[in-house]
Each structure stands twice: as structure tokens, then as C-alpha cells.
Amino acid sequence: MSTAADHFTRFVGVLAEALDDPGATGEVLAGRLYLSRFHLDRIVRSVGGEPPAAFRRRILLERAAYRLLTTRARIIDVGAEAGYGSHEAFSRAFARAYGVSPQQWRGRPGQIRLPAPNDVHFHPPGSLRLPAQQKVTPMDLLTSMVEHHVWLTGEMIAHAARLPDDELDRRIELSVDEDPQTIRSLLSRLVGQMGMWNAALADRDYDWSVEEHESLDSLRARLAVEGPTYLAHVREVIDQGRLDDTFVDALCEPAEVFTYGGMIAHVLTFAAHRRTLVALALDAAGITDLGWGDPMRWVAEPRT
């Protein structure tokens, strides 16, 4: 990375930290980067395509558009947060940027991001997002979804450990399975589903009896083996471009032929339903910090 590009990246970080600081003038931001105001303006303009002041105003307007969409705050308060001293000044600036007044935007919102030469934008709920250095491919997304599934299953097992046995074994009425389901049995099937396909891919039998009133210790131990093993299968198939390849599942009666891609889609589809049932049951039992287990933010966040 060039020195100028490095300074620009640091400027974006400093700006993100100073969005709510009305005293963060160009001179102040330059000082935090140990640059003169002249050099900061020159670097940001040359690398980012817009001067620092315009850059900051655009980001604050994007955040204001997000606030108008997601809160009931008064328009004058949203404008003040964006650095405007009056309702009129904010309305004029917003209308120039978005083509409609803040009130009209709130009624019929559009795209939050404004055109920008550098592709740096406000990223809800309160940060800035630089353009991705590497584009996410469909295969990256599929791998990330399986990684999320393995991770979330482990989180659900950990949260379930906070419940007494009667809550773990309380019947859940709605299920894709024929037999009555509980938090315990659903977690056991989430782990067992991966274990079952691991067994099929290795052409060995799967021991269904392990899922009969399985302990949480057993669930943790099995997930530690089956989760990474299943994920390794998925990564290998994706890396080698073999999603359309077939394999024989000799565990079926009679044996069936599946594609690897179809198997992964099957696991994610039915696992999503079971995970949702577990999330709802945990919430009903008073464990609310896990949420819905939505993979949306997971797949959007970079991981090392």
C-alpha cells in the first residue's frame, strides 16, 4: 500500500471516530494524523476524489438518511446530529443530495448511499466501510454460510447449558420431524445431521442411538469432531469446483445418488428451520441474548 493510500485509510478511521465530534475540523483531523491541513486535503482529494470537508458532509448525510429511516427522531434533531444549525439548512442540503426533502424521504426512502468516487460510505449502525479489497464470490458465500451454521450450533449448545432439564425436554409443537421435538433433540439433530453426512461421505454407518436423550457434554464433544469435519468436506468440494459431482449414499435404503451441492443445500435448509425453533424455544425460556441467529452480519464481516 502506498503512503498516500495508507494515510487515506487512517483518515477514514479517524473520521469514523469523530462523526459526533462537532469540533473535528479539518485542522483537528489533520493533527490527529500528524499531517498539516494542506497535506491532508491534498492526500484525501488525490486518493479519495473529494476534499475532507465534502467527504465528511456526505458521510453525515448518509447517516442522517439512515436515521430518518430507522428512528422516529425529529427531523430537526437528525439535522443537528449531521452538523446543521437549522431545519432549513439541513432540508436544503438533504434535498440537494437525495432529490427529496427529509420528510418525503422518511415516507418513501430510497438508496442510502450517495454517489462517491472512493466508494467509502456510512455503514450501519455507526461505522464507515471501505471498499472490499477482495470481492466475495458465490463460493465464498456458501462456505461462510456453512461456517456460520457450525458456529451457531455451538453457540446454541452453550446457551442451552443454562437451562434445566425440564426446559431442555419441553415439547416443541411445530417441527419438520415426525416425532415430537425439544431443544435437546433439535440440537442433537443439528449435530447429527452433519455427522450423518460425514458418515455417508466416508461410506460408514451412522449411530442414530447417540441422539436419544443426548447430554450436552456429548453434544459439545460430537460437534467438536463433526463440525470441522463437515466444514472440511464443504471447503474441499468448493475449492475443487466439484459441487456438481455426485456421490453414493449407501446408508439410504435403497442407496441413493446425490450431488455435493444438493447435499449442502439440504443441510442448510433444514438446519435453518431447526435453528429457528431452538432460537424461539430459548427465547421463550428467558435466554434472549442469542437472537435469531441471522447469518446476515456474519457473512458481511471479514474474518482472519
Image (tube, rainbow, N blue to C red):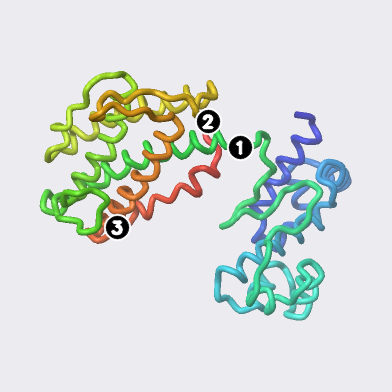
Is 12 positioned to the left or the right of 204 in the image?
right
Quadrant of the drawing holding the N terminus: top right
Q: Is residue 211 left or right of residue 84?
A: left
For marks 1 and 3, the one nearer the N-term is: 1
Pair 2/3: label in front: 3
Q: Nearer the viewer, mark 2 or mark 1?
A: 1
Circle on res. 304: 2
Residue 227 screen position, x and y as percent:
34, 30
Which amino acid lies under the numbered mark 1 shown in the image of this protein?
A: Val
Q: Nearer the viewer, residue 49 or 52?
A: 49
Q: Quadrant of residue 68?
A: bottom right
Task: Name the side, left or right, on which 205 lies relative to 1.
Answer: left
> Which of the two labelled residues, at mark 2 and mark 3, occupies the earlier sequence position?
3
Q: Position of residue 35 (x, y in %)?
A: 80, 41
How far apart in space, not on screen, are marks 1 and 3 (Cα)? 31 Å
Per the rendering, the mark at residue 136 is 1
Q: What residue is at 50 percent from the left and 28 percent from the top? A: 244
- Report the residue at 78% width, 46% height from top: 118
Residue wearing tag 3: 280
Quote the CA–CA distance across marks 2 and 3. Answer: 31 Å
Q: Secondary structure at mark 2?
A: loop
Sequence-first tag of 2 and 1:
1
Up/down of 47 relative to 196, above or below: below
Q: Please state which amino acid type lies under the numbered disc 3.
A: Leu
How far apart marks 2 and 1 lie (CA) works out to: 14 Å
Between 20 and 126, the one lying in front of the other is: 126
Element on which disc 3 rests:
helix
Question: Residue 19: x, y in percent?
Answer: 67, 58
